[in-house]
Image: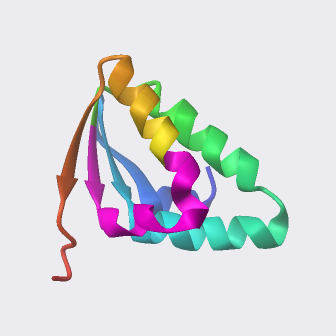
């Protein structure tokens, strides 16, 4: 896992993870420059396969067109029993 991936997706406890959508968007922009966008979304799917609870911050960023693929990833996560908690930005 590279430094930027670590910044937006962290495991706080064995079965829990945190995802900052603002940082995800920034990582998405980086991935468009180096051609790793599909790998980015696959990495998110893989990371979610090992947790049951996800804390999502800055969810407003999910409304942008570029992050639409994340919706289906989160839907699949919930369909297999995962739970998501949306938290407001810590900067508001």
Q: Where does the image place residue 56, in percent across and percent down from the top left? A: 29, 53
Q: Where does the image place residue 19, in percent across and percent down from the top left? A: 37, 54
Q: Residue at x 22, y 72 (%)?
A: 89
Q: Residue at x 52, y 69 (%)?
A: 25
Q: Is residue 3 visible?
A: no
Image: 26 above or below 9: below
In the rendered structure, the answer to whether residue 7 lies left or right of residue 54 reads right
**Magenta region, main secondary structure:** helix
Q: Residue at x 54, y 59 (%)?
A: 67
In the rendered structure, the answer to whether residue 57 lies left or right of residue 4 reads left
Q: Residue at x 69, y 72 (%)?
A: 30
Q: Is residue 79 magenta?
A: no
Q: Where does the image place residue 24, in percent across and percent down from the top left? A: 50, 63
Residue placed most toward the observer, 9 or 59: 59
Q: Where does the image place residue 82, in percent across and percent down from the top left? A: 30, 26
> Toward which corner of the image does residue 43 lie, by quadrant?
top right
Determine the residue located farthest toward the right in the rendered image: 35
Bounds of the magenta segment: 54-70
Rendered-image quadrant of the C terminus:
bottom left
């Amino acid at each position: 896992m590279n430094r930027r991936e670590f910044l937006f997706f962290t495991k706080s406890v064995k079965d829990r993870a945190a995802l900052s959508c603002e940082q995800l968007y920034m990582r998405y922009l980086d991935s468009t420059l180096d051609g790793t966008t599909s790998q980015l979304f696959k990495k998110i799917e893989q990371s979610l396969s090992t947790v049951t609870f996800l804390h999502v911050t800055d969810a407003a960023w999910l409304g942008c067109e570029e992050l639409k693929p994340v919706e289906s990833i989160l839907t699949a996560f919930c369909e297999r029993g995962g739970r998501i908690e949306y938290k407001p930005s810590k900067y508001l």
